[in-house]
Structures are given as structure tokens and as C-alpha cells.
Amino acid sequence: MSQTNIPYKIYLDENEIPSTWYNVRADMKNKPAPLLNPGTLKPLKADELKPVFCDELIAQELDDTTRDIPIPQEIQDFYKMYRPSPLTHATFLEKALDTPAHIFYKFEGNNTSGSHKLNSAIAQAYYAKKQGLKGVTTETGAGQWGTALSMACAFFGLDCKVFMVKVSYEQKPFRREVMRTYGASVTPSPSETTEIGKKILAAHPGTTGSLGCAISEAVEVATHSEGYRYVLGSVLNQVLLHQSVIGLETQAACRKYGIKPDIIIGCAGGGSNLGGLISPFMGEKLRGEADYHFIAVEPASCPSFTRGRFAYDFCDTGMVCPMAKMYTLGHDFIPSANHAGGLRYHGMSPILSQLYHDGLMEARSVEQTSVFKAAEQFARTEGILPAPESSHAIRVAIDEALKCRETGEEKTIVFGLTGTGYFDMTAYQSYNDGTMTDTIPTDEDLAKGFASLPDVKL
């Protein structure tokens, strides 16, 4: 179909919202390595995970074989509040770049949380309620996940305890207030309210925190509070499963108008957005039905893919969580206080790590000043103020479009716009004032993180 016949915004009908999640592990020849019990170094069994996660979520986490998993009707009904989300043809950006490339973005910011995180938050809250729990605990980086979970918990009448990375707690007070408006309690992490928080503060005085720190505190509270479980907004297999609605809708929209992506791009922190977007397309590639060029984009300040090691590591700084085999900078690595708080995690999804290790996708790291330059250009042309996290994908989408201008190739580029940046104005102020800097860890900095990797030889 001619690109001129494609509408600026492609909307699916309400009845085209996916009724099943897609589990990419079912099509992976090399499955993600199993989670390990840190005490025994043996693969974790379902019973060992029950004190931490909801029962149904454990089943989803460990299921490597079921390709399509039904979405409960209650979750489908909730999705109708803000889904399907549009696939937008970025014609104004194309014109500004003077490129023959065709650029599309899947926009996930059309809900109060401002991001894609609600797709998994409502699922995890649903299963917690179904199990009869009182509430859940979690961590949040920039605040998108905490905001989404607070909304989901309010919908189902659950208590929600959020540990927010300290630097984001201070930089993004309004996102914090949205969480409180929905009834969540929000604690800056690391804190003095948990034993693990106290240990981290003693070892790293004055630290601005990290997702690894916040995860440790949230898990401690969940496992010491009757009727509570811990829920996570990224990294885990179950989260990428729930987020597959992004890719399934994108796939359906592309098929509806005969669009064949050449390049699919997503920002990468823990992996929820990237994994959700690319999974159905990756399934086609794994089954030999089609081929795509996938690009994961991460901050140069926290380069898990591009400079990390593929090894077993703790998922949290406090070493209370299971070990996962993933690309990691070491659980003791504390990234600099960059403005893309949702990407400040030392590791990466085991699913995405295995796919990257098998050469099925590319990874690039970009500096935050160049990221915000791209964000500004996108905002001025497409009329949406993007989140700092999403802007990493925008940066590389623009780079690829400019390559097409140089070569004359008419490639089709699809990227994930995970959410809006209206709660990230401190970051935009720093960029506009010219005070934003780029922090890239040295090899010596990374060596300190790698030194914390556990000695696991399997």
C-alpha cells in the first residue's frame, strides 16, 4: 500500500484489543536461563517464589512453552479505558529531517500514568486481588511504574507501598503526588525504614539510589508483611508478557495498512517497553516468517547491554532477590543521577539478554544531551513532549532516518514512545539552561560493579 494512503494516526477498533498475551519464550530456541536460589544455586521452584510473588504471576514467570496466554476479561475491560493506543505516522518529523524514511511511533502515554506501565500494573493488581491479598509493594525509578501501580491498586482496593529512587523522588515531586493521590505511600530509597536500606546507606553515604536499591527495600517489606506480595514493573518474564499488548497492537495496525517495518527501536532499561514492542515481531523472526532489525537503546551512563557482562547476578543491590542470567553491570553498580530514571538499572531482562546474546538484536548507548536534543526536535515537530526514557528511542530513530537521507533508502522505522515528559520538566529545564552534562562510567567504574558479580559457574 502506498504510504500516502496511510492515515496520520492509525487506530484499531475496540474489538481489536488483544485477548491474549504473547509469550516469546515459546518460540525461542535458546530459552532464558532459569532464576537461581542464591542459597543453593539451584533453579527456583514455584513454591520458593510464593513468599514474594502472586501465585498466578509465578506460573506466568516460569512458563516457557505456552505461546498465547488468555487475558482475563476484567483486565480486557480495564484496557478499554485507554487502549488500543495509536500508531502514528510521524510525517512532520519526516519532513523536518528531509528523509525518504517512513517513521511510525506507538504512543503509550494516553493514560493518567503517562506511560506503558499500566499494561502490566493492572494485570499484577488483578492477580493480587484475586488471591485475596491486602496489598503490594514495589519500586519505581522515574515514577511511571509507581504511578501506574497506584492507579491499578486504587481500582481494585489494594494497599500500595512504593519505594521511589531518591534522585527521582527529589527531581519529580509531581509524579510522587499522583501516586499519593491514588492512595499509595511513597518512600525515597534507600531509606532508614528497612534493614537493607540502612545497610546501603552505610555502604554508600549520600547515594542518590538506584532501582536495585529500591527493589531490595520493597522485597523486604513484602516478605515481612502478612498479606502482601512484591510486584515489579520491568525485567521479569511476566512483565514482558503483559506488555506484549503493545507489539500485538502495533503488528495489527501494520497489517491493516500493509506496513512492513525494516527497523524496530525501543529504549532499554529493564526491558518492559522494548520487550513488549518487539516480542510479536521477534516471534515472526524466530519462526522464520519475516525479518526485522531490532535496536535496543540505553543510556551511556548505564550501559548494561553495550558494556555489561552476560552472567548470573542478583536482581537487586541488597542481594535478597533471586539471581538472573542477564546482561549486567553488577548489582553493586550505582549509576549516575541522569534524568532518565526509568533506565537506571544495573541489569536487563533475561529474555532480551538471551536474544541479544544470540545476535537477534542490536544495542546502542547514547548520551543524554543528544537524547534531549532529539526530544526537543520531536516535540517541536510532532507536538508531544516525550519522556526522557522514550527519547532514547527517538534519538536512534532520527539517526536511522538521517542515514536513509544519505543513502536514499526508503526504510520503514517503528519506535516505541513509552510516555509523556510532563512530569520531567526539571530535566528539560537542565537541558534548556545548558547545565545538563553527560556522565559515562570509566572502565574502572564498571570494574567495581563487576567485582560484585557472584561466582556462579553453570
Image (spheres, rainbow, N blue to C red):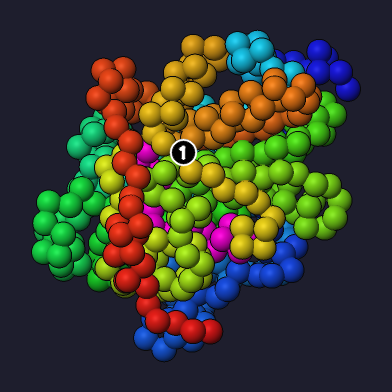
Residue 351 located within the stretch drawn in magenta: yes
Residue holding disc 1: 366
Q: Which image quadrant is residue 250 in? A: top right
Q: Position of residue 453 (x, y in %)?
A: 37, 73
Residue 406 sits above or below residue 201 on the image: above
Q: Nearer the viewer, residue 371 or 404?
A: 404
Residue 430 located within the stretch drawn in magenta: no
Q: Which element is circle 1 on?
A: strand
Q: Nearer the viewer, residue 41 or 450?
A: 450
Looking at the image, the residue that sits furthest to the bottom is 40
Residue at the image position 25 percent from the left and 61 percent from the top? 217
Residue at the image position 12 percent from the left and 51 percent from the top? 206
Q: In this picture, which residue range is highlighted in magenta?
A: 340-355
Residue at the image position 81 percent from the left and 13 percent from the top? 4
25 left or right, relative to 36: right
The answer, for residue 125, to whether it is visible in the render is no
The answer, for residue 453, to whether it is visible in the render is yes
Name the kind of residue labelled 1 in the image.
Val
The N terminus: image quadrant: top right
